[in-house]
Image (spheres, rainbow, N blue to C red):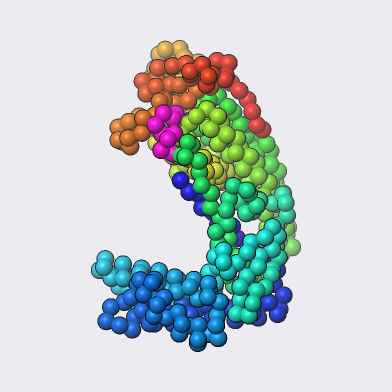
Amino acid sequence: MEVRRTVPVALDVDSDDAALLEDTVDTFLWSAQYVVDHAFNGEYVTTSKTTLDDETYDDVRDATDDFNGGLVQAARNKAAEACKSVVARWKNGKKASKPTFTSPHVVYDKRTATFHEDYVSLATTDGRIEADYILPDEDSDTPHSEYLFSDQYETTGAELHYRDGDWMLHIHCKMEVEPETSAQAATENGTVLGVDLGVNNLAVTSTGTFWTGNEFNHWRRGYEKRRGSLQHCGTRWAHQNIQSVGRKEEGRFKLTLHRISNELVAEAREKGCSVIAFEDLTDIRERTGASWGHKWAFNRLYEYVEYKAEEHGITVEQVDPENTSRRCSHCGFTHPDNRDGEEFECLKCGYENHADYNAAKNIGLRYLRRNQTGGDGGALLGVRLNSGTLNVNGGYSPASAEARTGVHAESHRFSGG
Ligand SMILES: [Zn+2]
């Protein structure tokens, strides 16, 4: 399995180089347009890259005073793709007209660009230029270090974009996911990690790991207070201050959520889970009384976990949240009085535990049931607890000896936060 990422990086370009890049953009777009015009010139639209290459390469090179061969080919590929999608629309009975290229950009690959640690070398209409990356502060929330400078990710190419006076490079990276941890292999005998989200505890897993919401709640209250007092001033200065406070606080929240998502994915990997199940986030505010800030945090957390889990072949899904907090994960008895705040005590079988932990197990079970009837074909073993699994009927099986790392199934392991 292959994981791909695109990392936007601003470039520091001086005026001489900027002129060269502008000329390169113009020439690239002209070349792509030339190929499209040629493709549309016959009885049928030509979409074959080889045919288009044979019929236009020399003409384009002549007309552009020997534009870089790699860039001519990239322009031709761009043109061929655009022609293909027009033909595909026609085949589906939809309207489409001849493509025109207006957005200023150039497509680079490994032959026309060289990606160094802190600068890039780019082919232009007149030799190469070098441009430094403008990287954000180290503690800011960006994926640069994670993908761009990671040994695991390979840089495959980039698109240069020009907008509002800024040169941006969208760098493409890819990573091959190890076959033994690929989704296919893991689904054969993997387990589900159920995750409950909430206000007191931001996240609780079916393996009994808790991430408390204290830190987040503290920040959010402080932020809302500062925002409130700034809004009170009502001046333009105050407005700008609100925005800068907002950006700074948001960055801090995101860093915390990145950390939690990393720990969550690590937990899933440690316990051999092939699926991480969350409750459906759509109406989570109505269900849990969470603030707008929490909803924002839950969405980010889900996004980050989904993104990071993909690299390890782990699927992330949302399940129907109905009654997951009222249902007994042990016997299935569902009643609003089973739950009293953070306490869960089943009125029928007497099962007692932390309410969020009980909910996390139910979320895992719901995925398990849905997956069995949905016919996805995966043979999941059960919901992963700290030292065993819960099968679809609520029965508990201890983990195999080598996988048994925890103390006992129902113990709470508090971490994070
Ligand atoms: Zn019960």
Q: Residue at x 37, y 23 (%)?
A: 392
Which quadrant: the C terminus?
top right
Does the image show residue 125?
yes
- Residue 372: say if magenta: no
Q: Nearer the viewer, residue 104 or 340?
A: 104
On the image, the x and y values in percent for residue 241 come to 72, 58
Q: Nearer the viewer, residue 69 or 44?
A: 69
Which image quarter: residue 416?
A: top right
- Residue under the point 45% across and 74% down: 76
Provide residue 198's location: percent of width, then percent of height. Answer: 55, 34
**Is 138 located above or below residue 382 in the figure?**
below
Percent of width and height locating residue 258 = 62, 43
Q: Nearer the viewer, residue 396 or 27?
A: 27
Query: In this figure, what is the number of numbered marks?
Result: 0
**Residues drawn in magenta:** 183-194
Residue drawn at x 47%, y 36% is 180
When the figure is inspected, residue 9 is found, relative to residue 349, above or below; the finding is below
The residue under the point 47% across, 16% down is 398
Query: Is residue 233 shown left or right of residue 187?
Result: right
Whether residue 344 can be seen here? no
Percent x, y for residue 403? 52, 21
Relative placement, left or right, of 3 versus 240 is left
